[in-house]
Amino acid sequence: MDVASAVGRALVAAGVRQVFGVIGSGNFHVTNAMVAAGARFVAARHEGGAATMADAYARMSGTVAALSVHQGCGLTNAMTGIAEAAKSRTPLVVVAAEVSEPKSNFYVDQSALAVAVGAVPVRVTSAESAVEAVALAVRERRTVLLNLPLREQALEVPAAEPVVPGVPERVPQVPDDAELAALVRLLQDAERPVFVAGRGARRARHALERLAESCGALLATSAVAHGLFHDNPWSLGISGGFASPRTAELIRGADLIVGWGCALNMWTMRHGQLIGPDANVVQVDDETSALGAHREVALGVTGDVALTAEKAYETFGDATPGYRMVEVGSVRWRDVPFADTSTTERIDPRTLSIALDDLLPAERVVAVDSGNFMGFPSAYLSVPDENGFCFTQAFQSIGLGLATAIGAALAQPDRLPVAAVGDGGLLMSAAELDTVRRLGRPMVVVAYNDEAYGAEVHHFGPGGHPLDTVTFPPTDLAAVGRGYGFESVTVRTVDDLGAVKTWLDGNRSAPLLVDAKIVQAPSWWLEEAFRGH
């Protein structure tokens, strides 16, 4: 057996079951070895798309995924998706062929590239080193670049050499007794507590809801944990830039805000505007370095979110009404009155999103690209739980939404995937429409099409700046979809959405692309977004 085959087998033995990538000569054999060992391989049309598919799959499945790329240019093509995964602490193994000869056209310092975007570089020296890469990804929740030198790939390894995975499960961090006691005291003293759950709380709903019931806390999430408290009557939805007016008001009125596995960064706390002047802020995270990283906290607790919440519940004592004495009312954006700006040629994105929310089945997984439009599907499209929303926005790159939907769809196969994208992001990633068609999965791709990079239009337009560089002539995205084998519909009014219902009620034998010609309208979160630049 050669090294490439041994590495491929070792990765699968260590837990990798899903691989995405684009095949070149350098990663051909190792990828085939993974497939032969039982992994599923999805061939993307671009390495950047493959990277984001792998990222989304890992997030929605709760397992480690792999990305397989060619040396040099294959890796550089994937770097934006890798940066997003690394910033999001996604457990992902990037298997990249590598040349060591600087004179080669394919040579780049691949390890330096990994470090530059926050990934961890590892060079293969044996099959065991591949297993260690998987262990590192799982144990530390890291994106790991596994460099596989071309010269070593063809070397023989002893056929009888056993490959023992030895990948331990991540051990929950037990909170310190003194920190736990301080947390319980703050919860007992609080009259208006609010819990804000983030990525690190995605598997802790039950524990957080029990504790919140005891102390009377209202429940909110960061964007990446959207859906975690779906159907809970005390849920406020998303905190931060996407928060409804009522949600923002209630969070701002809290005297205690506890971030559970949540960075409480400028997006989630609106640059601190959602924190009242007299509010205590607490952070619970299993990594000490995360505590107070974005804002000063009254208390930081190092501990696994679910375990910390369970232990706090056990010692809390008699239940108190807390903030649940207040009438929460409606916190949904769709219940906030607005002046519909739709015309006969263009539909208001709020009107569009509400209508889609009513049409689409409840069992859905929504992926949202970045751009001016993104607040509308994020706030108006409901999701059944935290596995119904995939938000690859840590790097704020446009063009990731379609690939995100593909990875999420494969991780949640019983749900209808919905990709919400802008016209700019869709055109950047249109090659992956082919991947959707080849997979044979029903999917709805909704293009919020304002024929512009809308964020720049609404940010610079009021200042009188020329906008020629960020506005474009009309593109028939429905025709583009049909070219890739999609059923397509152009939507200008609510009545045009009848074609979407017809597709939903049919056999869904082909994916659907909705070219929604939307009104050029600034979104409420945009000002906050640009303040963070």
Image (cartoon, helix red, strand yellow):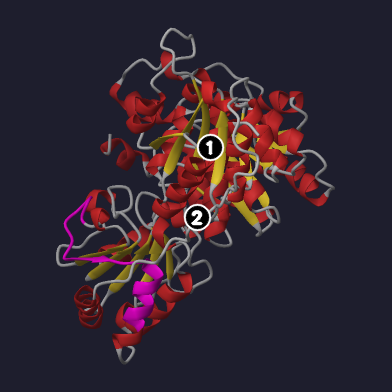
Residue 159: image quadrant is: top right
Q: Nearer the viewer, residue 36 or 373?
A: 36
- Secondary structure under badge 2? loop
Numbered circle sitting on residue 342: none
Tell me if residue 401 can be seen: no
In which quadrant will I find the C terminus? top left
The disc at residue 52 is 1
Tell whether 190 sits left or right of 206.
left
Judge whether residue 523 can be spotted in this image: yes
The question of residue 242 being in magenta is answered with no
Q: Position of residue 518 (x, y in %)?
A: 56, 34
What's the residue type where badge 2 is placed?
Val
Measuring 22% from the left and 51% from the top, which residue is drawn there? 293
Which x, y percent locates residue 146? Answer: 47, 35
Dot placed on the residue nearer the N-terminal end, 1 or 2: 1
* Mark whose residue sits in front, 1 or 2: 2
Crowding at dot 2, Cα within 10 Å, few <14 / some 14-19 / many 20+, comes out as some
Residue drawn at (53%, 70%) of the image: 231
Q: In the depicted view, which residue is nearer to us: 306 or 405? A: 306
Look at mark 2 in the image and give the residue it sits on: 167
Where on the picture, by quarter, is residue 317?
Answer: bottom left
Q: In which quarter of the view is residue 198 placed?
A: bottom left
Give the residue at x 75% y 45%.
498
Helix or strand or loop: what does disc 1 sit on? helix
Q: Amino acid at mark 1?
A: Thr
From the viewer's perspective, is residue 147 above or below residue 231?
above
In the image, which residues are magenta?
292-313
Q: How busy is the neighbourhood of tag 1: few (under 14 within 10 Å), some, or many (20 plus)?
A: many
In the picture, the quarter occupied by the N terminus is: top right
User: Left of 325 or right of it: where is 343?
Assistant: right
